[in-house]
């Protein structure tokens, strides 16, 4: 019996160590409880801690080293922009998902510049929060649908590099490559994009790799920003 108990304890410890750890940060306890309840419906997810303000959030980030921080923008002590920057500096392996009631293109732009991987409105949390977590867990960014539609027209006007003004007509991509960029930027997986285009997953992967090299994108986030600047993400 003792041996069986030890085996169960070891298995439980192993499962916990492999869980995807999430820190929930919001200054309203009822909101934190709702987010925790929703997140814990996903398998392999562990809400490792909660915080009600920016200073406490950073203490928990340093202590827990979470995989993901679900972060509100307006909080005591430090706001979400400051905390996002600090998280990326102190714990680069911790991703940030902004969950906020504020529908603001300018704030969203700044949040992304600070290093966040996603932006979801609290009003859309029931339908989009879990999808956002799954995307970020798989190293994909996530934008709330309303925000992506709005920002498609006026996201970033600055340049990606010399000689590139961010306009789609100046980009030497084929029609099929444009389709691949559009689907990936909308959050589709390689497999989903392949099914929608009627090609193999390997073909989509090949297109994606070629696009990344051709456009000199350093990360998948660069591809997303290009897609938004070029109005490839449709409402």
Image (cartoon, rainbow, N blue to C red):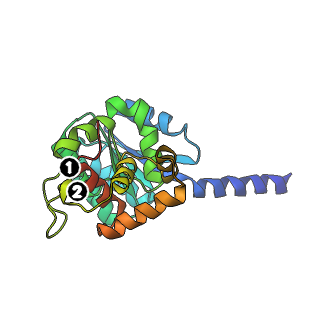
* Identity of the residue drawn at 42% across and 61% down: 207
Q: Is residue 156 visible?
A: yes
User: Could you say where residue 170 lies in the image, as x and y percent from the top left?
Assistant: 18, 60
Residue in the foreground of this view, choosing between 95 and 200 = 200
Q: Residue furthest right?
A: 1
Q: Which residue is mark 2?
A: 113
Q: Quadrant of residue 144?
A: top left
Q: Is residue 49 visible?
A: no
Q: Quadrant of residue 186?
A: top left
Residue in the foreground of this view, choosing between 156 and 40 = 156
Q: Residues within 10 Å of mark 1 (few under 14, many from 20)?
A: some
Residue in the foreground of this view, choosing between 233 and 8 = 233
User: Could you say where residue 232 lies in the image, as x and y percent from the top left?
Assistant: 28, 47
Say whether marks 2 and 1 touch (CB < 8 Å).
yes
Q: Residues within 10 Å of mark 2 (few under 14, many from 20)?
A: few
**Label 2: element kind:** helix
* Identity of the residue drawn at 82% across and 53% down: 4
Distance of label 2 from label 1 (alpha carbons): 6 Å
Q: Is residue 60 left or right of residue 78?
A: right
The C terminus sits in image quarter: top left
* Identity of the residue drawn at 28% across and 49% down: 54
User: Could you say where residue 127 lies in the image, as x and y percent from the top left?
Assistant: 42, 31
**Label 1: element kind:** helix
Q: Which residue is mark 1?
A: 109
């Amino acid at each position: 019996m003792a041996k069986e108990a030890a085996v169960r304890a070891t298995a439980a410890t192993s499962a916990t160590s492999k869980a995807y750890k999430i820190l929930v940060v919001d200054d309203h306890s009822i909101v934190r409880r709702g987010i925790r309840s929703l997140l814990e419906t996903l398998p392999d997810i562990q809400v490792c801690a909660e915080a009600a303000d920016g200073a406490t959030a950073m203490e928990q980030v340093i202590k827990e080293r979470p995989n993901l921080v679900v972060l509100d923008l307006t909080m005591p002590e430090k706001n979400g922009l400051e905390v996002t920057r600090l998280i990326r500096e102190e714990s680069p392996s911790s991703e940030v998902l902004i969950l906020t009631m504020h529908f603001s293109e300018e704030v969203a732009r700044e949040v992304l510049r600070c290093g966040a991987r996603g932006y979801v409105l609290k009003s859309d949390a029931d339908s989009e929060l879990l999808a956002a977590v799954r995307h970020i867990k798989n190293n994909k960014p996530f934008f709330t649908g309303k925000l992506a539609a709005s920002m498609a027209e006026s996201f970033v006007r600055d340049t990606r590099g010399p000689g590139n003004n961010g306009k789609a007509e100046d980009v030497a991509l084929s029609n099929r490559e444009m389709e691949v960029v559009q689907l990936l930027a909308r959050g589709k997986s390689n497999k989903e994009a392949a099914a929608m285009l009627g090609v193999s997953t390997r073909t989509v992967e090949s297109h994606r790799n070629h696009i990344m090299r051709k456009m000199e994108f350093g990360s998948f986030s660069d591809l997303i920003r290009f897609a938004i600047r070029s109005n490839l993400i449709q409402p």
